[in-house]
Amino acid sequence: MAYNHYIVLEEIATKVLEHSEENKRFFKASGLSEIEELTSQLSSVTDYGMIASDDDDFSKDTGKARDIFKTNEYSFVVFKKYEDGNMENLFQVKQWCKNMVNTVSDILDHYCRKHEHGIRPLSIQKFKFYSLGNLYGFWAIQCVFFVTEPYSYTINQNYL
């Protein structure tokens, strides 16, 4: 079973953020450039949520033994509403976002270690975190991570 970014993160959002059909807190984007299209959906969120993004970015590495690996790049954004001009509230919201992005990445790391949800052991080598700041009245932090998997190919002989 291959890793399915949207299914796995929606499952995590259901457990961690209490996402449901009645109380939407999970959203999909095909890339961060698509987040602007989510503004109408985000207007229904009164507190916090998550956006899963799959930009279809990847790299291939031949490695030292000529084994080929494909590394897919995925990301998610955790966001929470804050009171504009209230610095104490902003600091609390920032801390909540840091805690939540760490919780979600810890769950993904656990899946990797246990070989669950299509994530092979040691396939996630790095998580990177970026503060996005104000996103339509929400404070937001992005997590980018990379899932590496073996890659093989065949070339149509007519192309050679």
Image (cartoon, rainbow, N blue to C red):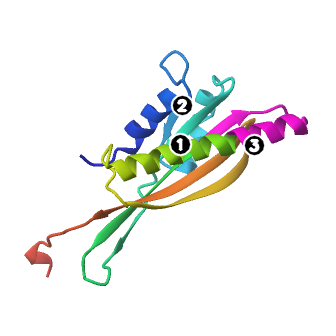
- Residues marked 3 and 2 touching at CB (< 8 Å): no
Badge 3 is on which residue? 94
Q: Secondary structure at mark 2?
A: helix
Label pair 1/3, CB-CB below 8 angstroms:
no
Please say whether residue 12 is one of the residues in the magenta stretch.
no
Q: Residue farthest to the top?
A: 22
* Residue 90 image position (x, y, % from top left): 82, 39
Q: Is residue 135 visible?
A: no
Identify the residue at image location x=52%, y=15%. 22
Q: Could you tell me if the residues under marks 1 and 2 are in contact, i.e. CB atoms within 8 Å? A: yes
Verify whether residue 89 appears in magenta.
yes
**Disc 1 to disc 3, how far (Cα)?**
15 Å
Residue range (magenta): 77-96
The secondary structure type at the circle numbered 3 is: helix
Question: Tag on residue 16?
Answer: 2
Which mark is first along the chain, 2 or 1? Answer: 2
Q: Amino acid at mark 1?
A: Val
Mark 1 nearby-residue class (10 Å; few <14, some 14–19, many ≥20) = some
Callout 2, which amino acid? Answer: Val
Q: What x and y, as percent, mark residue 92? A: 79, 37
Residue 104, numbered circle: 1
Classify residue 95 as left or right of residue 53.
right
Give the residue displayed 53% in from the left and 42% down from the top. Answer: 104
Amino acid type of the residue tagged 3 in the rendering = Lys
In primary-sequence order, the first of circles 1 and 3 is 3
x, y percent for residue 2: 27, 49
Question: Dot 2 surroundings within 10 Å: few (below 14), some, or many (20 or more)?
Answer: few
| Nearer to the camera, 110 or 10 | 110
Query: Looking at the image, is mark 3 or mark 2 earlier in the sequence?
Result: 2
Residue 86 on image: x %, y %: 90, 35
